[in-house]
Each structure stands twice: as structure tokens, then as C-alpha cells.
Amino acid sequence: MSTLDALHCYPALLARDARFDGRFFVGVTSTGIYCRPVCRVRTPKAANCRFFASAAQAEAQRFRPCLKCRPELAPGQAWSMMDASRTLARQAAELMDAGEAETVEALAQRLGITDRHLRRIFAAEHGVSPLQYLQTRRLLLAKQLLADTGLPITEVAATAGFGSLRRFNAAFLEHYRMQPSMLRRGSVVSACGEPALRLAYRPPYAAEALLQFIAARALPGIETVDFEARTVSRSLRLRHGGRELAGRIVVRFDAHQPVVMLSPCSSVWAGAAALIPLVRRWLDLDAEPEAIAERLGSLAAATPGLRLPGSTDRFELAVRAVLGQQITVAAARTIGGRFVERFGEPLDPEQAAPGVDRLFPRPEHIAEATVESIAELGIIRRRAESLIAIAKAWPQLAFARGDGGVAEALAGLEALPGIGPWTAHYMLMRGWSWPDAFPPGDVVLKKMLALREPGPDTADWQPYRSYAVLQLWREAATAPK
């Protein structure tokens, strides 16, 4: 359906309720403009409002994005358990965001379905065709780049995925009825000396807790945390448009607004379309904290807005999960640092910074390593063998590709040597941002549950048990010794 029930949406619009930011958009027939529900402009009359589940649906009805509230900054929809068709439709959207499929036929082939079936399930999930969705994503990214950066318009067009400046100008003028140059503003300069992008989220957000989680596990050379500046700096590889980009990014939590500033260095700017959704998942910016708190009850009260730290590289997460088996977080960090120093690659000096000067090892590099070369770093042989097995199987794993469902990914992981149920659940929890993981046999979880009276039924926390896990782990870590 292309519209939503006004009886439910209009009260949220009147209240400018941040819980609904990104969950719907409002098109105003008297102006031809669509807004986020948190927009600070004068609230339109109910008779002039049309409500849409996505920006793409609003633009398909010829509404233009508001220049004040900027719909391109809105949080997205949280990851959730869905049936097979809805999962495929979401995967199709993610592939288009990442620039991994330029045509419906190529996208359908990648997903293993017919293009007719893809169009049908995509329209049912997103309310628009795949091409309409892709066009909106490109235009909104271009709009954000024009507003937030000083990139030349030719680079904006290329980064947003337009084949030529002429096609970009024509599409922009047709859909937004203005020239791209009219959106130029003063750009925000990043810590890399590059422009910065704004990424919004729904408050509350326990930024300090997330920074502490990342800092405790930060690998030397890969990532650093600055608590005073509220920033994380890290290296990464990024696939976009069939090619690999590598460099460094910095994210900063704004102290006054529900916004994260994303600062990519020059080497990864071309992949901004894929980088933005990657960072949103890594920092869990699309979570719905009110819904999570409602399911977790008193457990969520200790740290309101606690988020699920994801990953920027699933292979990195898999390796770190194996290295961290049955040892402390600090010990896992030490061993992980040795692993990066031995098998990682130097980051381009122009992109590097103090504490961030290496790239995490590639799967193909580890697949060719010997057990002895890994074991001599202080890693037991069984885990060294497991790392090599994961690296060799990587191209075929549903976990690595993001294909299929949770059950398929778990089965593929648990079939590998050294990957038990706990590790598989942890990998899906953070690598896939699975919100309902509950690692079986976790000693800390058993202890913390035993201390709670009356003993909770963990089924009551579904579908947000991953957040319950994080709350219990944090409660254990911060308890008086």
C-alpha cells in the first residue's frame, strides 16, 4: 500500500513524535512537499496530508523532499524477523544501496529468483518498483551530498550512481523541480579533512555505553575511541559498484542533536551509497528504543537507549568471535592485535592516523596461512584451524553474503570446525545485527538471570533478546566487585 492511516499518523505529526521518525513521511498536497514527522515547520491541515511508509513512495506520487527537515537524514526501519518474501525484498534494497546490481534482471539473478517475482515482492514490501526505489535513493543521496559537502557536482552525480552529469541534472530537475546548485550550503569539514555527513537516529541513544563497548574491544591499528570527542576512528574495506575501496572513517556523536557525523576519507567517498547503510547498521542507528524498552521492561531501565554494536566487516567479526572464545575481552584484544600485525595490510599513509594504520586481514590471505603461523601468535591450534576453515568457506557462507535467513546462516556457521552454538549466535547478533539472539550456554547470562527475582522468562523479551543480552552483560561488567 502507498498510503498509511491518517487517524494514526496525524496525531504523531502534531506531536512531532521522534519515535515515528523514518517510519512514515507526510506529503502536503498544498505545497507538493513531503516531510519527516519531526519537521519543525507549521503543521499542515489534516485534509492536506498524505502519509507514506517510505520516501520512495512519497516521491513516486510526485512530492518533493523538504529542505528543512531533510528526509534523506531520517532513520531507517529496524531489522526484524520476516517471512521469506519480505526478507528477499529487503535484501534486494540493500544490494541496490550498495551498488551491487544496476538492473532488475541482475538483481533477480543475484537473489536466485525471477525478475517478475522480484518486482512483485518488492512492490508488496516497499510500495514502489525497484527502479523507483533506486532512483529515490540516488536522488536523496545526491541531495545530502549537495547540502553537506563541497564535492563538485560532477562527483556528486557519480557518487550517487548517475551515469552522467546530464542524466543527473535532468533527473534532479524533473523530480525536485530545481537545479542541483540551489542546494549548495557550507560543508562541514571532517577529522579527515573531508566533508562530513549527518546520520540521524531515534533517541534515546546510550552513546557512552556504545563507545565503552567498542573501546574495550578496539584492535590496535584498526580502531580507536576518543571519549572526550565522542568519536570512533577506524579503517575498513568497502565494496561498491563491483569494486573494493579501502580507507578510514571517523564517526562523532553530536552532544546536542540526535545525529552522528560521518567523516569518510577521500579513498572511500566514491562508496558513500554503500557506506551510509553500513555505518547505520554498525552503530544501530535504525533501532526503535521505545519498542525495545517496552519488551525488556525494567531490564532496559539501567541503560536507556542501549544499542546493538554491529560490525563493518563480517569476516573481521567472525575472526574476533573465534579469538575471543573462553578468554577475557582484554586477552582477546591482545591476541587480535597480534593477528592484525602479522596478517593485516598497511593502510595508505594518506588515509592513516595515529592508532589507525592497518586494514584487517583478508579471508583469502588467512585461507592460505598455515596453522603454525597462526598458532605461534599464542592462539591454540584448534582455533587456528577454525580460522583457516572459516576463511576457506567464506565465499559460500550465507553469513558472509547476507543471503537466506537466520536458520540457514546458523547451520552454515555451526557446520564449520570450532564454531559452536554460542559463537554462531554471537556472530549473527553482531555481524547480521540480529535483534533476537540469545547465545546458549553463556555463563554470564546464566549468572545474571539467576540473580533476578523472580526469574525472568526470556521469551518475554522476544524479538529483542539481543538487547537483553547486552543489558545483562553490561550489568555484570559494571557491578561492584
Image: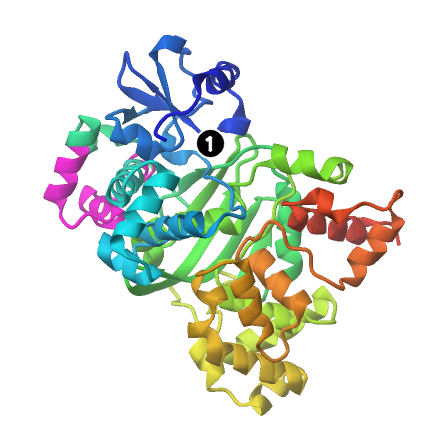
Q: At 52% across and 64% down in the image, what residue appears?
A: 408
Q: Which residue is tagged 1?
A: 23
The amino acid type of the residue labelled 1 equals Arg
Secondary structure state at the residue bearing disc 1: loop
Q: Is residue 141 above or below residue 329?
A: above
Q: At 27% across and 14% down in the image, what residue appears?
A: 31
Q: Is residue 112 above or below residue 473?
A: below
Residue 461: within the magenta?
Answer: no
Q: Quadrant of residue 45?
A: top left
Which of these two is toward me, 292 or 118? Answer: 118
Q: At 60% across and 38% down in the image, what residue appears?
A: 205
Residue farthest to the left, as pictured: 166
Q: At 31% across and 35% down in the image, what residue appears?
A: 56
Where in the figure is residue 50, as x and y percent of width and height?
A: 35, 19
Span of residues in magenta: 144-173
What colouring does the structure picture have?
rainbow
In the picture provided, is 93 more to the left or to the right than 411? Answer: left
Question: Callout 1: few (<14), some (14-19), or many (20+) C-alpha neighbours within 10 Å?
Answer: many
The answer to whether one can see residue 193 in this image is no
Q: Quadrant of residue 139?
A: top left
Give the main secondary structure, helix, strand or loop, of the magenta stretch.
Answer: helix
Residue 148: within the magenta?
Answer: yes
Picture quarter with the C terminus: bottom right
Where in the figure is residue 72, as x and y percent of width and height?
A: 36, 35
Where in the figure is residue 362, as x and y percent of width and height?
A: 45, 74
